[in-house]
């Protein structure tokens, strides 16, 4: 079967140059493993954080299933980087919901191998120090987000961590854009109060 021909102009915003991730998406659609690995390195940590804050059991397995679905459907995917992010997190959310239903019926959930992780390992080797620094930088914030009501926490994770725009979040959650804006605003105000006073020298005027 002949590989699809993907042109840069299919995704180009003629007002701005393409970013590294946009170029990676074009390359990945054409079957380039390095392009796919670039997408995975950027989006996989965000995907895991989203699933963990949702409280889903086996976040790593869910993420692996999500990427497996992406691998199978990537050649037929149409859209830009924002659409790809929305597609990725929509798949993850649906997989998480399906898993929750399966567990409630007493069905077993079988882990799958992550096809993206192997490709990524060939192109990157982050140090233990880098991993520790990233974990320390995000752990406290994720714990705070997890204290929010589930609906608000999901909005914040999709909007802030996943990087989806309001329209994509609204579509994914089946809500109006205005409701998403209000929900995220209220959630961030709650988080600001929960976090307590800022360090010395960081007080608001």
Image (spheres, rainbow, N blue to C red):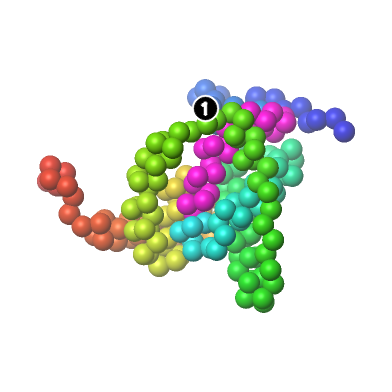
Question: In which quadrant will I find the N terminus?
Answer: top right
Residue drawn 37% across and 48% down? 138
Residue drawn 37% across and 40% down? 133
Residue 10 showing in the rendered view: no
User: Magenta residues?
Assistant: 28-50
Does residue 150 lie above or below 92 as drawn? below
Question: In this image, 125 relative to 1: left or right?
Answer: left
Percent x, y of residue 89: 57, 51
Residue 40: in magenta span:
yes
Q: Which quadrant holds residue 200? A: top left
Residue 68 showing in the rendered view: yes
Question: In this image, 15 relative to 116: left or right?
Answer: left
Percent x, y of residue 6: 72, 28
Q: Which quadrant holds residue 178? A: bottom left
Question: In this image, 111 relative to 14: left or right?
Answer: right
Residue most extreme to the right: 1
Percent x, y of residue 165: 48, 46
Q: Nearer the viewer, residue 86 or 137?
A: 137
Residue most extreme to the bottom: 105
What is the tally of numbered marks visible in this picture? 1
Does residue 51 lie above or below 75 as drawn? below
Element class at badge 1: loop
Residue 43: in magenta span:
yes
Q: Main secondary structure of the magenta part?
A: helix
Question: In this image, 25 relative to 195: left or right?
Answer: right
Name the residue beneath numbered marker 1: 19
Q: Nearer the viewer, residue 56 or 113?
A: 113
């Amino acid at each position: 079967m002949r590989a699809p021909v993907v042109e840069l102009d299919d995704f180009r915003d003629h007002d701005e140059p393409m970013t590294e991730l946009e170029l990676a998406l074009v390359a990945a659609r054409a079957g380039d493993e390095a392009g796919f690995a670039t997408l995975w390195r950027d989006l996989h940590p965000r995907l895991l954080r989203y699933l963990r804050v949702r409280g889903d059991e086996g976040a790593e397995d869910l993420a692996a299933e999500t990427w497996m679905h992406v691998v199978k459907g990537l050649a037929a995917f149409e859209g830009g980087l924002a659409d790809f992010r929305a597609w990725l997190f929509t798949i993850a959310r649906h997989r998480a919901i399906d898993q929750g239903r399966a567990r409630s019926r007493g069905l077993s959930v079988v882990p799958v191998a992550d096809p993206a992780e192997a490709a990524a390992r060939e192109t990157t080797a982050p140090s233990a120090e880098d991993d520790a620094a990233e974990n320390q930088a995000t752990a406290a914030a994720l714990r705070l987000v997890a204290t929010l009501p589930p609906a608000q926490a999901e909005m914040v994770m999709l909007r802030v961590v996943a990087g989806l725009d309001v329209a994509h979040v609204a579509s994914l959650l089946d809500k109006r854009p205005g409701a998403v804006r209000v929900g995220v605003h209220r959630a961030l105000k709650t988080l600001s109060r929960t976090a307590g006073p800022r360090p010395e020298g960081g007080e608001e005027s």
